């Protein structure tokens, strides 16, 4: 796919910003100038605004350091960062699987790269920093959901939010999965917001250009993402209607309702009504739904949890038992065939029918709904039955008894 198609389209944006800083120019002003000279028609043909550096001014010192490197080393760095980020994402998702699930999941891990959100796409070839950021965040989340140790997760989210502010919504995950994490999540969120407020106070000129860049991404490139609010914004944009106020209100309503629903599910999960691994997968997917702008590389981070939820959901809905012999083997083959049919149908519709946006949203909501139904399944209870030893059975019994 890399040889036959385009690669590094997001990485090139960072490359242009580094080149601008090398020459003493402003990367935001340079990107805005490029978009204005290209015209809205050219951007519409490309499908999005591709020359805008959309990371916060706090990242510019890092770009200046990278600008000291030769170009070949920068290219190697971006490729390595994307690859390592993907491997870290895969590892975190693999640890969400049960032992019997890991036996078949390991054969699907390479294919996960090209099916973000279970729908085919080549987003991994973009070189977007989200792969590295999510890899670090999910790796730091593993000690959290396993041992309730969230210190490194908060640090990773704070660092990631410097590049992508919406990632602060990931702070809901330890609240849902951990114990008494309200203070840690809230304080980290306050620090993240304070960093942006301090940046706006120290460098108002750069922040104004940064916000203008973000505005162009929506006004000209209609780069709204693939979440429920993003689909609404894209619909309003394509029909020439104002979208800012409508999408803001829609996001507040959706995110508020989703957060309350997740808190309710968390309360049910803490009562022991569902297996731990099932709840962690559903909580992670629900947390990603809180992101106001869900992109393909965001979906890549939860592809394995979505796959596990779909597999477990089909088992629960049909009441099938997994096995290798007899009736269990027939049920296993039927479930694999049904799951493969749903998977192929979604991808064929994407290729032959409508755009990626509505299909991925349907898949996302369908899998999440299936996951919430799993939470009603009781966790397995292991009973220890006392069996008396032969020596106890041979003891004499008193006549009174």
Image (spheres, rainbow, N blue to C red):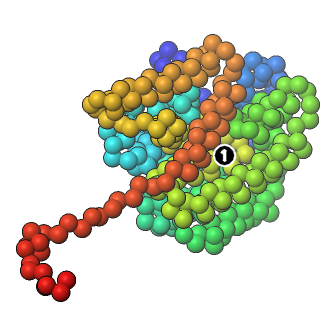
Residue 122 in the image: state x and y as whole percent. 54, 26
Residue 106 in the image: state x and y as whole percent. 35, 37
Q: Which secondary structure lies at badge 1?
A: helix
**Measuring 58% from the left and 45% from the top, which residue is drawn there?**
373
Residue marked by disc 1: 289
Pick out the residue farthest to the right.
Answer: 241
**Measuring 82% from the left and 19% from the top, which residue is drawn there?**
41
Q: Is residue 123 above or below residue 2?
A: below
Looking at the image, residue 384 sits to the left or right of residue 347; the answer is left
Q: Is residue 134 above or below residue 35?
A: below
- Comparing 375 with 162, the one in front is 375
Numbered circles on residues, count: 1
- Comparing 164 with 317, the one in front is 317
Image quarter in which the C terminus is found: bottom left
Q: Is residue 297 above or below residue 359?
A: below
Can the viewer see residue 379?
A: yes
**Measuring 51% from the left and 67% from the top, which residue is drawn there?**
151
**Measuring 71% from the left and 58% from the top, which residue is drawn there?**
260
């Amino acid at each position: 796919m890399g040889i036959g198609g385009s690669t590094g389209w997001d990485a090139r944006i960072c490359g242009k910003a580094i080149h601008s800083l090398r020459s003493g120019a402003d990367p935001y002003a340079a990107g805005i100038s490029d978009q204005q000279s290209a015209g809205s028609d050219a951007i519409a043909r490309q499908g999005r605004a591709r020359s805008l550096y959309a990371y916060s001014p706090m990242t510019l010192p890092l770009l200046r350091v990278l600008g000291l490197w030769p170009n070949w080393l920068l290219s190697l760095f971006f490729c390595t960062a994307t690859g390592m980020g993907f491997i870290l994402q895969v590892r975190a998702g693999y640890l969400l699987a049960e032992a019997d699930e890991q036996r078949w999941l390991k054969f699907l891990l390479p294919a996960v790269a090209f099916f973000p959100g279970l729908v085919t796409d080549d987003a991994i070839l973009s070189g977007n920093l989200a792969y590295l950021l999510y890899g670090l965040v999910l790796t730091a989340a593993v000690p959290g959901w396993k041992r309730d140790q969230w210190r490194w997760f908060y640090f990773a989210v704070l660092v990631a939010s410097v590049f992508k502010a919406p990632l602060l919504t990931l702070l809901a995950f330890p609240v849902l999965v951990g114990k008494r994490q309200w203070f840690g999540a809230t304080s980290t969120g306050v620090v993240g917001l304070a960093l942006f407020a301090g940046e706006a106070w120290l460098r108002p000129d750069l922040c104004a250009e940064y916000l203008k860049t973000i505005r162009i991404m929506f006004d000209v490139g209609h780069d709204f993402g693939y979440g429920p609010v993003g689909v609404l914004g894209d619909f309003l944009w394509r029909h020439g209607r104002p979208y800012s106020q409508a999408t803001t209100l829609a996001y507040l309503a959706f995110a508020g309702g989703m957060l309350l629903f997740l808190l309710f599910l968390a309360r049910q999960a803490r009562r022991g009504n569902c297996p731990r691994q099932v709840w962690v997968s559903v909580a992670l997917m629900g947390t990603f739904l809180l992101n106001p702008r869900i992109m393909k590389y965001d979906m890549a981070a939860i592809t394995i949890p979505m796959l596990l939820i779909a597999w477990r959901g089909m088992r629960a809905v049909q009441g099938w038992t997994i096995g290798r012999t007899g009736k269990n083997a027939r049920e296993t083959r039927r479930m694999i065939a049904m799951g493969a049919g749903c998977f192929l149908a979604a991808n064929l519709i994407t290729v032959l029918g409508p755009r990626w946006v509505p299909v991925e949203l349907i898949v996302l909501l369908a899998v999440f709904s299936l996951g919430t139904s799993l939470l009603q399944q009781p966790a397995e209870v292991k009973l220890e039955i006392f069996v008396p030893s032969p020596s106890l059975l041979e003891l004499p019994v008193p006549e009174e008894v």
